Amino acid sequence: MNEKTFQILTDPELVAKRHAWEQRLKELSGAPIYLQGIGRAGKTDMYEDAEQRVRESLDDLAKQVELLGDMKVFRPLSVRAALHGVHFVDKIFGANVFELDGEKDNWQTEYLTSSVGSLERPDLATNPTWAAARGFARAFLESGVTVPVFQLPTIASALNIALNLYGQELLAAMIADPPAAQHDLEVINSVLLEIHDWYRANVPVDLLHQVACGARYQPPGSGQICGCSTQLISGEQYKQFVAGLDDAILSRYPNGGMIHLCGAHTQHIGTWREMQSLTTIQLNDRAAEDLEIYLREMPEKIYYVNPCEGMLLEKVEDLAKTHKIVICAEPAR
């Protein structure tokens, strides 16, 4: 990173602009906020040279800083960890994670051959994937920049990771061998908690943000879980196996946090309504079509919405007049 980039990305006026937008997110009421952030991950292999990857990210972001001055759309800048995509934690657990056909960021994983119930906790102290992630975070912190924030890798959730590791065998075990399923979910969650705790202890709260913050940027001190896979289980299964684990992660953060949804998940509203750590619901794709159901059943929550064919931008803008909604799109023209 050259001196010019450093000066740009430590400019107190630009930091103040980000803070002003964060305050608007905290006070969200009566009018939508539009969110379209910019994240950069660099190109150099993180395992080989984390510092160079950070420099590449920062040099690119320095060219985007004028976007923070947009008064209509919040365009936060972030450095993305982007390590193995949604299969970051799978890799930590020893799964074979690979890029499909060599396509950039098209990460896939092979299911474990071991039985559900036999999952062992990896030693994070010696795990090369976790070491690479920590090295990238340290390189970002050592850069000294204060304008862009640091975006976590995809830590996801215990259910998401368990399904990545086992596929339908995990769902079958929930019915045929509940203790086995519960064991592995708890092992996974203990690792997720340790990862979250490391980031919270080492990255300043002002700079620490969750994965995909370009469309899910929350006020500092907020957590996130990925609830994509909850569409595959019943409300009772979620309550029995998963809710307590999700709550444990969000409760680590002083402001609670968000669950990301992209399918048909309304069977869990009763549980989510009572989950005090869950302050925010993020909806895109199929999940956004149910926005009015969520608003009716959980009006006290904050909603981040990606408009779609079944929930058009104009409709979301209208609902935002009376509900706390962040719109992950450009405003209507």
Image (spheres, grey):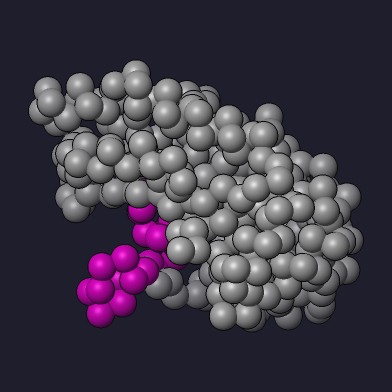
Q: Position of residue 250 (x, y in %)?
A: 69, 42
Q: Position of residue 111 (x, y in %)?
A: 50, 75
Residue range highlighted in magenta: 80-107
State the residue in front, 1 or 8: 8
**Residue 105 lies within the magenta run:** yes
State the residue in front, 292 or 47: 292
What is the total number of numbered labels drawn onto the structure image?
A: 0
Q: Is residue 240 visible?
A: no
**Residue 177 lies within the magenta run:** no
Q: Residue at x 12, y 23 (%)?
A: 3
Quarter of the rendering containing residue 327: bottom right
Quarter of the rendering containing residue 304: bottom right
Quarter of the rendering containing residue 110: bottom left
Q: Residue at x 32, y 42 (%)?
A: 67
Position of 248 with respect to 17 (left or right) is right
Residue that lies at the very extreme toward the front in this rendered image: 333
Q: Residue at x 81, y 79 (%)?
A: 176
Q: Position of residue 13 (x, y in %)?
A: 35, 21
Q: Residue at x 82, y 53 (%)?
A: 299
Q: Position of residue 239 (x, y in %)?
A: 85, 61
Q: Is residue 27 visible?
A: yes
